[in-house]
Image (tube, helix red, strand yellow):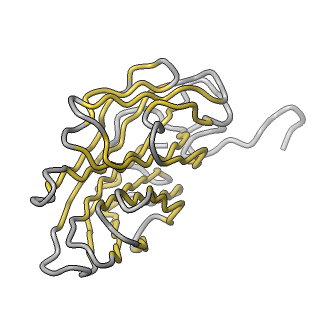
């Protein structure tokens, strides 16, 4: 490499195709809190994977003072407590700042449980090239939930992100397979369990994303939202 030059990823930018988990928090008040964003660069996209239970859905999100766009969301009503269980991905282009406030506003009411993971992404466009979502309500208490979708990846070395959510659980665990690597599981008491996964360097073509959610003792639903971006 010549002196003064830095490594360049496919796509022509030193940050092309990069996805990095920079923060994750859960609990009361974390819907309006300061989060780490990591390294700043021109065109940096901050994506948040939100897992929550509430009587309504999130109507808006701001990231570092920038109005975010909801890219994909999945909702499933539990049919018992009158709550919706939600997995959502919101994005904003935030080129400056290594940290900032993220604010999530509910359309009405309050959160029962809330968890969020924050990613920085190097991509040519904030808009995903594809996204998908799914949900499932198990037949019996404690039944595991398997959720699977297939994304169409347009360009080699793309980035994939997935977020899953369960609520009203006593304990749970999640395992991602057939695609992205699990980054973190975040649980807030017995009210919500969130999980996120990501992968960079994804080849073009059909790309399966699957998560197995192992819940215990409480009839519940599982939801998942996924998206991919060009490098």
Q: Is residue 143 left or right of residue 17?
A: left
Q: Quick one: 85 or 204, which is closer to the camera?
A: 85
Residue in view at x 21 percent, y 30 percent: 108
Residue in view at x 25 percent, y 59 percent: 223
Q: Is residue 168 left or right of residue 68?
A: left
Residue in view at x 58 percent, y 26 percent: 100
Q: Quick one: 125 or 187, which is closer to the camera?
A: 187
The image shows residue 41, relative to residue 89, as above or below, that is above
Place of residue 224 in the rendered image (x, y in percent of width and height, measured from the top left): 29, 58
The image shows residue 36, relative to residue 179, as above or below, that is above
Q: Quadrant of residue 56?
A: top left
Q: Is residue 70 left or right of residue 136?
A: right
Q: Is residue 173 left or right of residue 207?
A: right
Which image quarter holds the N terminus? top right
Place of residue 184 in the rendered image (x, y in percent of width and height, measured from the top left): 53, 60
Q: Quadrant of residue 72?
A: top left
Residue that protrudes farthest toward the top in the picture: 65
Residue in view at x 37 percent, y 28 percent: 61
Residue that protrudes farthest toward the right in the picture: 3
Q: How many marks?
A: 0
Q: Quick one: 222 or 119, which is closer to the camera?
A: 222
The image shows residue 231, relative to residue 180, as above or below, that is above
């Amino acid at each position: 490499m010549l002196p003064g030059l830095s490594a360049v990823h496919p796509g022509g930018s030193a940050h092309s195709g990069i996805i990095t988990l920079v923060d994750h928090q859960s609990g009361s008040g974390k819907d309006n809190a300061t989060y780490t964003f990591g390294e700043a660069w021109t065109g940096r996209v901050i994506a948040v994977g939100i897992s929550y239970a509430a009587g309504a859905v999130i109507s808006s999100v701001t990231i570092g003072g920038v109005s975010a766009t909801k890219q994909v969301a999945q909702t499933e009503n539990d049919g018992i407590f009158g709550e919706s269980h939600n997995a959502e991905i919101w994005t904003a282009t935030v080129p400056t700042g290594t940290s900032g406030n993220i604010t999530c506003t509910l359309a009405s009411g309050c959160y029962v449980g809330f968890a969020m993971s924050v990613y920085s992404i190097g991509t040519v466009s904030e808009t995903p090239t594809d996204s998908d979502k799914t949900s499932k309500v198990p037949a019996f208490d404690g039944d595991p939930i398997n959720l699977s979708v297939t994304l169409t990846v347009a360009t080699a070395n793309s980035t994939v992100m997935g977020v899953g959510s369960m609520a009203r659980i006593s304990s749970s665990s999640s395992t991602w397979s057939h695609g992205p690597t699990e980054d973190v599981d975040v649980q807030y008491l017995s009210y919500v369990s969130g999980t996120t996964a990501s992968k960079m360097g994804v080849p073009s073509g059909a790309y399966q994303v699957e998560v197995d959610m192992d819940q215990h003792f409480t009839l519940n639903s599982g939801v998942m939202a996924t998206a991919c971006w060009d490098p």
